[in-house]
Image (cartoon, helix red, strand yellow):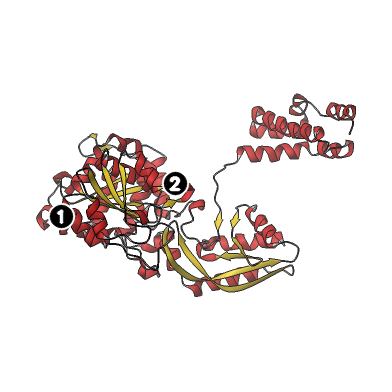
Amino acid sequence: MKTETKSELFRELPSVDELLHASEFATLVSEHGSTAVTDAIRSVLARLREQISSGLLNRESLQLALGGLKSATESQLRRVLSYSLRPVINATGVILHTNLGRAPLAENALAHVREAGSTYSNLEFDIEAGERGKRDVHVDRLFRKLLSEVSNANGETAASAVAPGRSPVERGTGILTVVVNNNAAAVLLALNTLAEGGEVIVSRGELVEIGGSFRIPDVMAKSGATLREVGTTNRTRLADYEKAINEKTRLLLRVHRSNFEITGFTEQPSIEELVALARKRGIPFIEDLGSGALIDLEQFGIRGESTVLDSLHAGVDVVTYSGDKLLGGPQAGLLSGRFDLIARMRSNSLFRALRVDKMTYAALEATLLAYVKREYTAIPALRMMSLMKEEISARAETLATHARTSKMRMELIDGESVVGGGAAPSSVLPTRLLAITCESLSADDLLARLRHNHPPIIGRVEEGRVLLDLRTVFPEQDACIADALQRIA
């Protein structure tokens, strides 16, 4: 295309002001305002200029584009003015999918967040005393109840446990819990408080990398503590810890192996052995539990995942864990353990930098209340774990019946769901998968069409088929998937 021809095409483009005052754009200006519409028109015209410059448009194609200026402007407005963070349908079968927001919140948690966030609250106000309070109290009573067995084992008497107005926190006894913004922050706070300027002993086989290329050694380095690695990748003995203890040692640390397991020729001291060593040498022992289940998950078919209570019962001084994994609540980092150690962390200036807001406290309080009431199926992540293969199969069969067309082949096959989120890496849950092929689309193209649905539907591709696992799909979303498949076909 010649330069002068391009110049002619450029002259055919209308001005921004001309379009802004055109009658067909009046409705857009009324709905979205002149500033937003002006920016959208500029973006649309800029794209046309780029296409002319690149030789992608001739006179005929430019005329077609100019005839669709209003539609293009509407599309640009939708892209700019709509939310970037939006709901998706998780049909991957990964319950705690980190990229999809991990644990969905319970209905009660959402209601409490709305209640606390839409008006003023007593976040840091003691209503009884009429003075400033502490935000910890909103979840402290629930954690004390859930961890009361440990408090009693650590010297709480029946009389002190019921003394009016005197909680274990006020008496300086029992198990205390504080909340920060995620588990990495919990580890950072613990190490900075208890080991800054000293050494922390940890097994070489536990120096894990978690999602997004974040590595535990890097988090430890930021705390101001020095990492002292012991053992080898697959074998670390109790004697390795004992030999490494010196006058600079401040902590023993056990880190949960997120997302993987070491099998075969392996060795690792038990929690009880490390507890005994720590007490013998007068050194605190911290366990980064990672996922942090509050109840035994064997009832849901998840094995080998120890609970916070298991660790505290074994004598671990401080346990760090996540709020949005196996606990099924909001993103948060939780530290539960010895009152004196947690109290030191609470007084650390870093704690204020890492603290959470009223919405997180509201969601966490409602989630913990479900545990206290033993209403486990009210928590979506636990409810998904509890689903039986037969129930999932029945739903998938119904969905396939409603969505089936002559251009799509659907069949039910056996499969496995996983917990995800770095929790229970070796545990799988039997499920039934909806396997879909479309005669006019490849599996990747079909998956892309599903992702561009409203709301987006996220599945996976295996052996040339799109696989959808309804374990992680809310039942009310089944119809949306069926409608999307019919439209695509």
- Near mark 2 (Cα within 10 A), the count class, few <14, some 14-19 or many ≥20, is few
Where residue 463 appears, as percent x and y from the top left, is 64, 67
- The residue singled out by tag 2 in the image is 214
Q: Quadrant of residue 464?
A: bottom right
Given residues 320 and 475, the one toward you in this image is 320
Q: Quadrant of the C terminus?
A: bottom right
- The answer to which quarter of the image holds residue 172 is top left
Q: Which residue is mark 1?
A: 280
| Quadrant of the image containing the N terminus | top right
Q: CA distance from mark 2 to mark 1?
A: 33 Å
Give me the disc on residue 487: none
Q: Amino acid at mark 1?
A: Lys
Kindly identify the amino acid type of the residue bearing the numbered disc 2.
Phe
Left or right position of 282 against 268: left
Residue at 26 percent across and 53 percent down: it is 143
Query: Which of the two residues, 416 or 485, is positioned nearer the viewer here?
Result: 416
Residue 55 against residue 483 in the figure, above or below: above
